[in-house]
Amino acid sequence: MEWREILSSRALDRFRPVLIGIEGALLAVALLFWVSTAFDVDSFSPETWGAWACQFPARYWAAVQCISAAMIVTGLMRPVTHFRVAIGAGIQAAQFAALAYSATFTGGQFVIGVYPSVLFVPFHLILMVEALRHERG
């Protein structure tokens, strides 16, 4: 498989089941995080996530993650609504980049910042670009 096949105009449709599975898993993690923040105040600490991220309540971070993952999952269901996928992926990329920045540069754990910046930010940026590219025709 060549890279052109991965980034083809039908990539979202071709890899739709896998993408739904990935975003469904991220939605499940976000829901668990949201429940965890409802019952445990220490689940979102500056020592882990950095001081900048902790300026906002953890339930807001979890809610944004839930909403954006749900947008991507519902956007990938047939018929595929590319603009919804693009908006959800853009929100996810921005949130993961913000959390990575906070953890890396404002006193959090370095590995917590590296993980989303290496895995989740590029993945969601590619997903967003592909959805926008297909939306425009």
Image: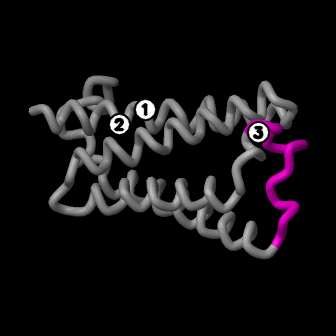
Q: Earlier in the sequence, mark 3 or mark 2?
A: 3
Give the x, y percent position of residue 110. 82, 31
Mark 1 and mark 2: span between their CA atoms? 5 Å
- Which quadrant of the figure contains the C terminus? top left
- Which quadrant of the figure contains the N terminus? top left
> Taking 109 as reference, is 115 left or right?
left
Residue 41 lies in the magenta-colored region: yes
Q: Quadrant of residue 60?
A: bottom right
Residue pointed to by mark 3: 112
Residue located at (32% from left, 42% from top): 86
Kind of residue at disc 1: Leu
Give the x, y percent position of residue 72. 37, 54
> According to the image, what is the colour scheme of the structure?
one colour
Q: Quadrant of residue 5?
A: top left
Kind of residue at disc 2: Met
Q: Please, what secondary structure does the residue beneath circle 2 have? A: helix
Give the x, y percent position of residue 44. 80, 54
Q: Earlier in the sequence, mark 3 or mark 1?
A: 3
The boundaries of the magenta stretch are: 40-52
Mark 3 and mark 2: span between their CA atoms? 23 Å
Residue pointed to by mark 1: 125
- The label on residue 128 is 2
Q: Are marks 1 and 2 in contact (CB under 8 Å)?
A: yes
